[in-house]
Amino acid sequence: MPLRPFAALPQDSVGIVIPQQIDFPEPVLLSSGRALPVRIVYETYGTLNAARNNAVLICHALSGHHHAAGYHSASDDKPGWWDTYIGPGKPIDTNRFFVVSLNNIGGCNGSTGPASINPETGKAWGPDFPKLRVRDWVKTQAMLMDALGIGVWAAVIGGSLGGMQAMRWCVDYPDRLRHCVAIASAMKLSAQNIAFNEIARQAITSDPDFHDGRYLDHNTSPRKGLAIARMVGHVTYLSSDAMGQKFGRDLRSGTFEPGNDAKVEFQVGSYLRYQGESFSDRFDANTYLLMTQALDYFDLAREFNDNPASAFAKTSSRFMVISFTTDWRFSPERSREIANALIRAGKSVSYAEIDSEYGHDAFLIPIERYQKVLSAYMRSIDIGA
Amino acid sequence: MPLRPFAALPQDSVGIVIPQQIDFPEPVLLSSGRALPVRIVYETYGTLNAARNNAVLICHALSGHHHAAGYHSASDDKPGWWDTYIGPGKPIDTNRFFVVSLNNIGGCNGSTGPASINPETGKAWGPDFPKLRVRDWVKTQAMLMDALGIGVWAAVIGGSLGGMQAMRWCVDYPDRLRHCVAIASAMKLSAQNIAFNEIARQAITSDPDFHDGRYLDHNTSPRKGLAIARMVGHVTYLSSDAMGQKFGRDLRSGTFEPGNDAKVEFQVGSYLRYQGESFSDRFDANTYLLMTQALDYFDLAREFNDNPASAFAKTSSRFMVISFTTDWRFSPERSREIANALIRAGKSVSYAEIDSEYGHDAFLIPIERYQKVLSAYMRSIDIGA
């Protein structure tokens, strides 16, 4: 890989970032009733101002992590997962905001998760890792916030599962954030969404290399099952039109000519397999199970007699809700439910439905109108400067 | 299972039916260039009239077979897969029509398929079974037609992959059918459809019990992979709304109460697993691979410079095209492409888009308007009586 001189990093990049970590002195009591010793790995971009009122929290989605922006080294060939939206002059402008991005507990990028060592056994937690709810992530994010000396977030922002965390913040810590930005999210998953997650979990747990979740003890991992899980995710995060435009029915090998008995391979199939395999190289299967379960369990209105407006009754932040036209996993209808609940609860909410052909993945992709809408909202956040 | 007295069969049933079989004397030359000894299992309902002009062919979809209507015994607890549409007084009225329904070659319900014995080895064909195209099914259906003494079909009818066979009939044997009914079908699969099929195939072939397709030689089968393949199919054949109405977020086990660390199980997950496992009990994995490949390869306009209208130019039948509003695997747009191509080709075509909440599976389900539309079309077919 060629070394990239520091000077060659894009000018609107936050530059080279160094992940940091914090080990909390006491185990954290989780919603499951279990206590977990917690390490959190995080990054920050920009500078906390003297008033300490310009901090923004980024909550990641299913397969995300703390590295949201910038580069880890001068030779890094790609930036963090949301680099398009975080940086100097970008929608989440690091000239104005101090941005905090972490790897959630249960993750597999450095924060305490199923691949961490269980101090009681000296082995990886594996399937013994406690079940997590979105509220556990929010609680540990609040502990990180305290450790960083931040009293109130200017904004908590997330897409998909990250948007669920942002909404949970408003309910659990109404006084500790001023703005909530929920992108391509939902107040709860649909039966169809749960079904796709169930297929992904079945693919993982029925792989013989899963070993009831103790695959690390066997020096292996359910690579094939995890790859299939990722393929299911990948296809459902894209729109049919986007896949059609990207691949059509182009062939990678084989031919349709008469007399051919070899297997025809489509480009889309080869691409999917590559995506699945490379995901298996970098992601932990138990983390995938935990994260999809937390997604399934999330239901913001459940404790409020299933009344969405009641769920938001005690929140005190302002809201920005964004959806994408071709997103069928977290469709615009789901975002309108959030916006409508906020309106019924008498809260301040802006809602934008962005034209996009990219399905659910749109929230990660540079789209001009989305950038403008998010920029405008972020500029409206008062930090007294 | 309680015995059901013959008299208790529904009055509009074709009654007890006995599958028949035919072994063709010579191997059949397939589009792949290979020759295959062929047995076909089929059923017939109703009576061939003296003019021999009332015969209707039913083409089955991915997981279908010859048993489309009636019961196999008085104790049979459910009828054939399209019993709602075939029978005395039903849309495909056996008082008027002589209905032929077969298991396609490559299948696993009695016709020659991967689980049949390869005469050259004395073992199951398994992965050595020739690759199939939709045209191979149509060719063998025409051979069955000859054997039954039928010169021209009154109609060839199919849903989904069955609709592709019906359209292929019009292209390959334009003078041998008078009507073509293509339901919830398409002139070719989309990249998204191919992607879902690819996931299903990956699930099957990465199951260690697949043994490169020679699982029967190992007295096993890739049950888990096939179950996952079926789950993918099942979720994508249903609409999101239908799944929401059927299951919502109801739990089968576990609880959302705080302090619970057990796995929460949703009804939809448990249902899917059951569907997957029971499919694995009755279906052959190599057949699933073959059928999904034939689906992927199908592209009626390919040999006609990708011009859909040209594909139909030499056809001489009349057409009925039907789609369902919430079908997202074979959306109404795909059926409109068929209808528009037929219009451009100057052919006679009726098109109906049926309101339904059941997704792609709607074509198998009793829906009043669909029944009326299909009945009206079938009544319009002249059999001179």
Image (cartoon, coloured by chain):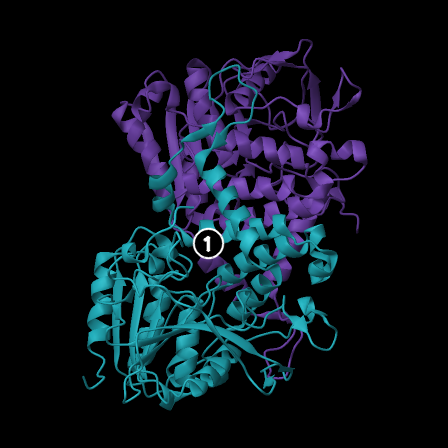
Chain colours: A cyan, B purple
For mark 1, name the chain. Answer: B
Lateral position of residue B92 relative to residue A321, left or right: right
Q: Is residue A311 visible in this depiction of the protein?
A: no
Lateral position of residue B270 relative to residue A17, left or right: right
Which amino acid, mark 1? Ser
- Of A56 and B319, which appears nearest the observer? A56
10 Å crowding of disc 1: few (<14), some (14-19), many (20+): many
Residue B375 in the image, given as x and y percentages of width and height = 44, 38
Which residue occupies 68% across, 36% down? B284
Lateral position of residue B53 relative to residue B1, left or right: left
Q: Is residue A174 visible in this depiction of the protein?
A: yes
Residue B332 lies, with reference to residue A265, above or below; the image says below
Residue B85 in the image, given as x and y percentages of width and height = 53, 40
Q: What SS does tag 1 mark?
A: loop
Residue A178 in the image, given as x and y percentages of width and height = 30, 84
Residue A131 lies, with reference to residue A262, above or below; the image says below
Residue B214 in the image, given as x and y percentages of width and height = 73, 31
For disc 1, the marked residue is: B239
Examine the image and state in which quarter residue B75 appears: top right
